[in-house]
Image: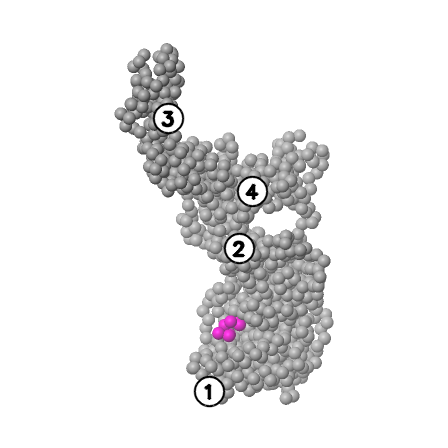
Amino acid sequence: MQWEPVIGLEVHVQLSTCSKIFSGASTAFGAEANTQACGIDLALPGTLPVLNENAVAMAVRFGLAINAEIPEYSVFERKNYFYPDLPKGYQTSQMAHPVVGRGEVDITLGDGTIKTVRIHHAHMEEDAGKSLHEDYSGMTGIDLNRAGTPLLEIVSEPDMHSAEEASAYIRAIHAIVTYLGISDGNMAEGSMRCDVNVSLRPKGQEKLGTRAEIKNVNSFRFVERAIAFEIERQSEILEEGGVIVQETRLYNPDLDETRSMRTKEEANDYRYFPCPDLLPLMLDEAYIEHQRSLLPELPSEKRQRFVESLGLSTYDADVLTGSRPLAEYFEAVQKLCGDAKLAANWVQGDLLGRLNRDGLDITQTPVNAEQLGGLLARLQDDTINGKAAKQVFADLWECRGETADEIIETRGLKQVTDTGAIESLCDQVIADNPVQVTQYREASEDKRGKMIGFFVGQVMKASRGTANPPQVNAMLTEKLDALL
Amino acid sequence: MHDKTLAELARGLAAGDFSSRELTTSLLARIKRHDPAINSFITVTEEQALEDADAADALRHRGEAGVLGGLPLAYKDIFCTEGVRTSAGSKMLDNFIAPYNATVVEKLRHAGTVSLGKTNMDEFAMGSSNENSYYGPVKNPWNPTLVPGGSSGGSAAAVAAGLAPAALGTDTGGSIRQPAAFCGITGLKPTYGRISRYGMIAYASSLDQAGPMARTAEDCAMLMNAMAGHDARDSTSVARNVPDYTQDLDKPLNGLKIGLPVEYFGEGLAPEVESAVREAVKVYESLGAQVIDVSLPHTRLAIPAYYVIAPAEASSNLSRYDGVRFGHRCEDPADLEDLYKRTRAEGFGDEVKRRILIGTHTLSEGFFDAYYRKAQQVRRLIRQDFLDAFTRVDVLMGPAAPTTAFELGAKADPVQMYLQDIYTIAINLAGIPGISVPAGLADNRPVGLQILGPHFGEAHLLNVAHVYQQATDWHQRRPEIKE
């Protein structure tokens, strides 16, 4: 039978507020255990939560970015369960009345088509702490630094049908939250985590199959891998006439498989009820409009502008708007050199290629936008040629100079455009290579076009790469053709 | 000195008749002498009290003392006090030294008051007799075979016995007003949101409210001036101007419209309590008030609704007592589940466990709509009853409790105990303020008159209570305590 996978995602995004969602403790990552947990985070008797306004603003801006309705009223509820890294014995979350209502996100697939994924809602909640199972000789350590970190949980409709679509969706969410500046989107540090719901149904059937939920998948690649594994696993069961058990599973990246964590029968009854310590959150029109006025240009808007006013291909525009730092880098380079296509080629080719090779992301680039823009400007105004540009870029990468101009100067890479100098080099090369000159003269016209390359190469070599290739080409053609 | 009201003591301190140290020393000595029989204190902070007193005296010396400067107070052991055990009357927190002060404690300390210590209470404020304390029951100073009421039984008994001129209590379903009635003192439960709950150990968050317990309405007014007000650390506290509660205490009551809820004078009300309350109402009539009967039709639903909402919130509020970070932890837990089970089985008393079980059940999948949602609907109806009544009358009056203080051990059946709060519980559900004032003695047992007002009507309630206390002397009666 033909099975159709149905995939829905819950993406937990850590909001980049300075302090926690209900306390004044810092949210900075990587501090010594339990140094960023105050009395409220420890759930000391008598302490009470106070909602972080900035977290609300960030959630609302996300809602506006996905064209969602922002209800004028939302409610925090308590999700009750016992766990050592959950200090209050409940997680303050939202359930019946989330801060962000229905919205939608466009995703771009590999073939360039755009698909819309509906968002069911997004709600605010607090993160739990961490249980540390190493180094405590049979005991478990608890680190509450993360407890109370604000999260925005974005719940999609089950609108995706392949690992590729799910991956494109997470990238789109990642782009939106990083553009908005509401999250650093750092998956390695847990700033974005996904729960993935996967079910299969016979192709053509409308009714959904039984789903498995894969918890806490924390990289783009793992999401794809986990889904691929899960589709495989479920279709094998179904093909053999078995039934899928509704359950929660965990993805193990080392083994590249998912394993059952608990079945529906073992699931907690979370006993949600409105948190009596927090009043309903009321947002008026003026507040929402103010948040709207703070929205930056969003990825989809930027993409469209790159195509329409900068003349980039949809593919280039898509790659370059993949993250806000990358888009901003490209735009800075483009402004400095004045040529969008040239900037796009260099950023996507040389820059991303090298970053990729060295395992760096755009924010860690050794060559900043001013340096690359300065380099391309020299290429653009013919100060250097393409070959020299590559050398300058390599030097910038190794931090051998502050600016492209400095490197061009110290390494003498300035292109020779002095006609006299080029002419004497050309004459010299023609004189030094009588055999090739003879061959050239005897060749047919279309072959001569190719043979000219040899002479150009010799002149370039003699000029140590500084001659202007088109100029050399023109001059050589003229001189050799005169010998015919 | 122990017979004086807070206002009288304040005048004495201001006049230099005695120092705060002298006052504090004499009260500490009294506590030492009499409290072993009453058991109203869980912790006496003698050292801190003397330090506080000296600091207050020094301030007064410099002419910088405020109205409350140097006045000793006791705190129900539900308010976090920095560096001092804060037990909530539970074994669970027997070893808990609070690392911070509750907002009200902070405010009263800032006002220059002296902290005598922490008073006994029903465990986590769950109870109406103070028999549910890990630290043993409190005896009613009027008669040691009687309960003082609860859950703020220690605070009420300490004031009645002259061990502290005033104390703080909390009231979730009557826990200030009922013990105030049983011990013959004045106790105010302010409007929900009037006083910060920050640092007050939560029982049922949407109902809990701190309030003053003292000899007179005037004393309560003095304390309210320091206690009330918005707190940025408590989102449910209300940002609303705090009046001077002492300003209008003497305003005459001519034309005051008093409503008597017919439901508060029905079956279950002890005749001696009813006659005392009706006598008090007559006093008001003689002071120029008009009396009319009103109805609060949903009164009978108050106890059922309360016993859904309060345990539901409690079941969640008390989840933090898990043996992981503070408080009691069982010995040698075998695993996580064992840690939770034994810690909580050992740390909580029966009534607390009962309410956690009720609350866990009513919030469960499949029961939530029938219990919790329904109870919230009832809560709105009850609130509306009061709002409707206050369109016709200025205040409501009735008994604070259906009986006078009962014998220790007399109410072994929890439901009989829950019925104690029949006249107080609806007030918490509605969020309105209520005050209990001494209004008689029946068989040498105090009777409390309860006066209710609309939201944020505390100043008026205190005025109504104060004028009554100018006309009567019930609040001046003291239990006989062998010196």
Query: Label for residue A461?
Result: 3
Which residue is painted at 58% across and 61% down in the image? A43
In the rendered image, the residue lying farthest to the left is A420
* Residue A241 % position (x, y): 72, 34
Give the secondary structure at mark 2: loop
* Residue B456 % position (x, y): 50, 69
Mark nearer the N terminus (3 vs 4): 4
Residue that carries the numbered disc 1 in the rendered image: B15
User: Disc 3, disc 2: CB below 8 Å?
Assistant: no
**Comparing labels 1 and 2, the label whose residue is closer to the camera:** 2
Q: CA distance from mark 2 to mark 4?
A: 23 Å
* Residue B35 % position (x, y): 64, 81
Query: Label for residue A219?
Result: 4
- Amino acid type, label 2: Ala
Which residue is painted at 29% across and 23% down in the image? A424
Residue that carries the numbered disc 2 in the rendered image: A31
Q: Chain of mark 2?
A: A
Query: Which quarter of the picture shows residue B25?
Result: bottom right
Q: Which residues are magenta?
A: B104-110
